[in-house]
Structure formats: C-alpha cells, structure tokens
Amino acid sequence: MVTREELLDLALLSKLDISDSDIDKLLGDMEEIIKFADTINAASTGDAEFDNINDLQNVYREDIVKDSFLQDDILRNCKTVENGFFRVDNHNHVE
C-alpha cells in the first residue's frame, strides 16, 4: 500500500504539484495499479520459456554508409553562417 507521505515524496521528487483533492484519488489509482501488478506477478508460467518466443535472430537492418549532402547545399538557406556552421543565437524570440 502506498501512503500519503510516500505519494507526496514521489510528487516532490517528480516536481509535480498535486492538490489535496487529487491525493485521495491518486492513492486509490495507485492501489489498483499495484493490485494488478501483483496479479500478473502471481500468474504461473509453468515450464514456458518466454525468451525469444518468436525464434528471431538479429532483426536489425544492415548499416549502410551513404554519401552526405555537400556543406554548401546544407547551409544555402541559413540566415547566419559562421566558419562553415549554422550560427545559433541564444534569443528567446523569433524574427
């Protein structure tokens, strides 16, 4: 069972602002989630082997190196370029 103090500690660590009216509802929701997780954990798998149930091997695509775009083409539409790179100004507005 999750206590009110644990919920408030978790909210503080998560930087969440939880109103007093929401605490009781959240405690009930968390209790239901924990009950569900306990039900799943209690399920018997018998002798079933669940590792690699689809008998898959390496399913990643081959890493193929391709030519990049030319630097001049990439920078062509940029308003400000400096030493061959995008210049990014630290402004909080859009012009």
Image (cartoon, rainbow, N blue to C red):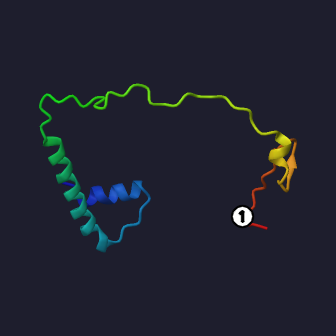
Is residue 22 placed above or below 58 in the rendered structure?
below
Residue placed under numbered mark 1 in the picture: 92
Q: Residues within 10 Å of mark 1 (few under 14, many from 20)?
A: few
Image quarter hosting the C terminus: bottom right
> What is the quadrant of residue 69 in the picture?
top right
Image quarter hosting the N terminus: bottom left
User: Could you say whether the residue bearing mark 1 is in a helix, strand or loop?
Assistant: loop
Residue name at image x 31 percent, y 32 percent: 54
Residue found farthest to the bottom:
21
Q: Does residue 83 appear to the left or right of 23 in the view shown? A: right
Is residue 27 placed above or below 39 in the rendered structure?
below
Q: Does residue 76 appear to the left or right of 22 in the view shown? A: right
Looking at the image, which is closer to me, 77 or 58?
A: 58
Q: Does residue 75 appear to the left or right of 58 in the view shown? A: right
Horizontal and vertical percent for residue 50? 24, 31
Looking at the image, which is closer to me, 45 or 33?
A: 45
> What is the quadrant of residue 79 in the picture?
bottom right
Residue name at image x 24 percent, y 68 percent: 24
Q: Does residue 9 appear to the left or right of 25 in the view shown? A: right
Residue name at image x 32 percent, y 60 percent: 8
Looking at the image, which is closer to me, 81 or 14?
A: 81
> What is the quadrant of residue 15 in the picture?
bottom left
Horizontal and vertical percent for residue 39? 15, 48
Q: Amino acid at mark 1?
A: Asn
Looking at the image, which is closer to me, 79 or 66?
A: 66
Residue found farthest to the top:
57
Residue name at image x 30 percent, y 58 percent: 7
Horizontal and vertical percent for residue 61? 52, 31
